Image (cartoon, rainbow, N blue to C red):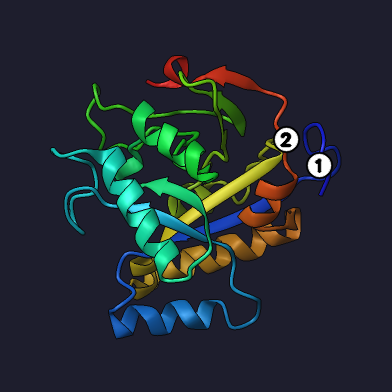
Amino acid sequence: MPHTGHILHGRYAVVSCHVERPLDDAVWRRFAVLHEAQARGPLGLHTHWTAPDHARPTGGDPAALVREQAGWLRSAGLQVDLFCGGGWYLDELVAEVLAELGYTDCTATAFRPDYLASDAVHLQLDEPAWLELPSGRRLLELTTTHSIGLLARGVLTPDRRQIVHAYFHDTDLLDRRRSAALRVGLAILGLKRQPTDLGELQRGLRPAKTMSFAKSLG
């Protein structure tokens, strides 16, 4: 992967899993099987601010919670380099903590999730970018472009993005239809693009686009 400029050659595909029920044996068995054929990918923090079934914050200090969780992971000897906000939530203070920690963020999406209220804070970007923060720090943003549904519907439709970043939840593996759609979508995506992972993108990608964090919120 190149270390200067944008990715110069090829079109790449990455997939991330939002692991939310790692202590559920049925979920974990399916998740482990999915990764038997390749080395496990890089580890990220996926914060639910309110509850396992209520991801977006309803109070408290979201930035402080991210810092607390990052500290716990570090104390447990886990190398964490990525972040995705539960419910696709990210604000300036959380972004500042992520930049301070040296994380790369994956919270921005190329689509607006249907369940978000019209006035809900959301970061929407079509492609990776550097986000300029009020402190002067920059945060590398690796946009999430496809859900399982979008991946399945886009199988026959050309996608001209240089990087496709699809995501799924570990619990999707318990649903036969969603699991089957994921496997088909990933198989076809792998035929069209060069597979890589978020760790490689984080180390090698230097997006050409730089933009203000505040102006990118919608």
- x and y, in percent, of residue 124 in the image: 45, 28
Q: At label 1, which amino acid type do we have?
A: His
Furthest residue in direction top, as rendered: 215
- x and y, in percent, of residue 10 in the image: 83, 45
Residue at x 42%, y 33% (from the top left corner): 95
User: Considering the numbered disc 1 on the image, is that residue within a helix, a strand or a loop?
Assistant: loop
Q: At label 2, which amino acid type do we have?
A: Arg
Q: Nearer the viewer, residue 129 or 33?
A: 129
Q: Is residue 53 left or right of residue 137?
A: left
Can the viewer see residue 71? Answer: yes
Q: Which mark is residue 181?
A: none
Q: Is residue 127 left or right of residue 57?
A: right
Residue at x 47%, y 36% (from the top left corner): 109
Residue at x 57%, y 60% (from the top left corner): 185
Q: Are marks 1 and 2 in contact (CB under 8 Å)?
A: yes
Mark 1 surroundings: few (<14), some (14-19) or many (≥20) residues within 10 A:
few
Furthest residue in direction front, as rendered: 75
Q: Nearer the viewer, residue 42 or 127?
A: 42
Can the viewer see residue 91? Answer: no
- x and y, in percent, of residue 20 in the image: 32, 64
User: Considering the numbered disc 2 on the image, is that residue within a helix, a strand or a loop?
Assistant: loop
Mark 2 surroundings: few (<14), some (14-19) or many (≥20) residues within 10 A:
some
Residue at x 55%, y 44% (from the top left corner): 102
Measured in 3D between alpha carbons, the distance from the residue under mark 1 to the one under mark 2, in whole angstroms, is: 7 Å
Tag 1 residue: 3
Tag 2 residue: 206
